[in-house]
Image: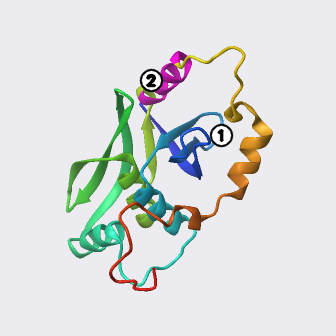
């Protein structure tokens, strides 16, 4: 069984300083954080904020290819969690048939946002994610900044899409002003 979720926000993990996307169900009872790379965070942030780019990014290119081939993304599903790695599947409607394509969740979500396709998470993934969180050991007398809800809220509210723009790839040769 799958649960439909929406992208609630893009944030930086205060402990690892890694970007993460937070999915939340429509009733806002369940959420799922997925840690992602900087380029993927940038692609998602640009789409969430509807910031145009001079040239198509990879997910825009995939969208353009699918449109040219008259294929449609019917949904994306975060389908598994194994060894702390999330897996996703993109469901494509091609003619009268359906094709599934293995994907990283970040790429599937970036594409889903661009084509306005629904995002689902398998109930099994939510159960596994909860059990992973429970198994994380904490030092009893060593509170971290992640334990302070006020600091987390302040930090999350201060994040802007530009925080995700720089990646470790170096300057873009198409943008000499970098």
Q: Is the magenta stretch mostly helix, strand or loop?
A: helix
Going 76% across and 49% down the picture, which residue do you hit?
A: 154
Furthest-top residue in this view: 140
In this orientation, which residue lies closer to the viewer: 143 or 82?
143
Indicate the position of residue 49 as horizontal and vertical percent values: 58, 69
Q: Give the foreground label among 2 and 1.
A: 2
In this orientation, which residue lies closer to the viewer: 43 or 95?
43
Going 27% across and 55% down the picture, which residue do you hit?
A: 92
Indicate the position of residue 69 as horizontal and vertical percent values: 20, 71
Kindly indicate the quadrant of the structure image that contains residue 152: top right
Indicate the position of residue 86 as horizontal and vertical percent values: 37, 37
SS class of the residue under badge 2? Answer: helix
Decide whether residue 132 is among the magenta residues. yes
Furthest-right residue in this view: 150
Quadrant in which the C terminus is drawn:
bottom left
In this orientation, which residue lies closer to the viewer: 44 or 139?
139
Please give left or right for residue 147 compared with residue 117 in the image.
right
Q: Mark 1 points at which residue?
A: 27
Going 62% across and 42% down the picture, which residue do you hit?
A: 14
The answer to whether 122 is drawn above or below residue 49 in the figure is: above
Neighbourhood count class around disc 1 (C-alpha, 10 Å): few under 14, some 14–19, many 20 upward: few
Q: Name the residue under label 2.
A: 128
Going 68% across and 50% down the picture, which residue do you hit?
A: 156
Q: Earlier in the sequence, mark 2 or mark 1?
A: 1
Alpha-carbon span between mark 2 and mark 1 = 20 Å
Decide whether residue 38 is among the magenta residues. no
Which span of residues is magenta-colored?
125-135
SS class of the residue under badge 1? Answer: loop
Numbered tag placed on residue 94 in the rendering? none
Indicate the position of residue 81 as horizontal and vertical percent values: 37, 30
* Circles 2 and 1 in contact, beta carbons < 8 Å: no
The answer to whether 163 is drawn above or below residue 119 in the figure is: below
């Amino acid at each position: 069984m799958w649960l439909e979720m929406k992208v609630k926000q893009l944030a930086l993990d205060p402990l690892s300083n890694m970007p993460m996307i937070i999915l939340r169900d429509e009733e806002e009872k369940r959420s799922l954080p997925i840690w992602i790379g900087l380029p993927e965070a940038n692609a998602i942030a640009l789409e969430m904020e509807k910031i145009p780019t001079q040239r198509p990014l990879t997910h825009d290119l995939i969208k353009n290819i699918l449109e040219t081939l008259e294929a449609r993304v019917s949904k994306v599903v975060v389908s598994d969690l194994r060894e702390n790695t999330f897996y996703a599947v993109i469901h494509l409607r091609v003619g009268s048939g359906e094709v599934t394509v293995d994907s990283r969740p970040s790429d599937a979500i970036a594409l889903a946002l661009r084509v306005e396709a629904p995002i689902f998470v398998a109930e099994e993934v939510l159960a596994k994610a909860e059990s992973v969180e429970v198994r994380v050991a904490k030092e009893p007398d060593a509170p971290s900044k992640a334990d302070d809800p006020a600091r987390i809220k302040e930090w999350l509210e201060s994040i802007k899409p530009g925080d995700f723009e720089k990646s470790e790839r170096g300057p873009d040769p198409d943008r000499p002003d970098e």
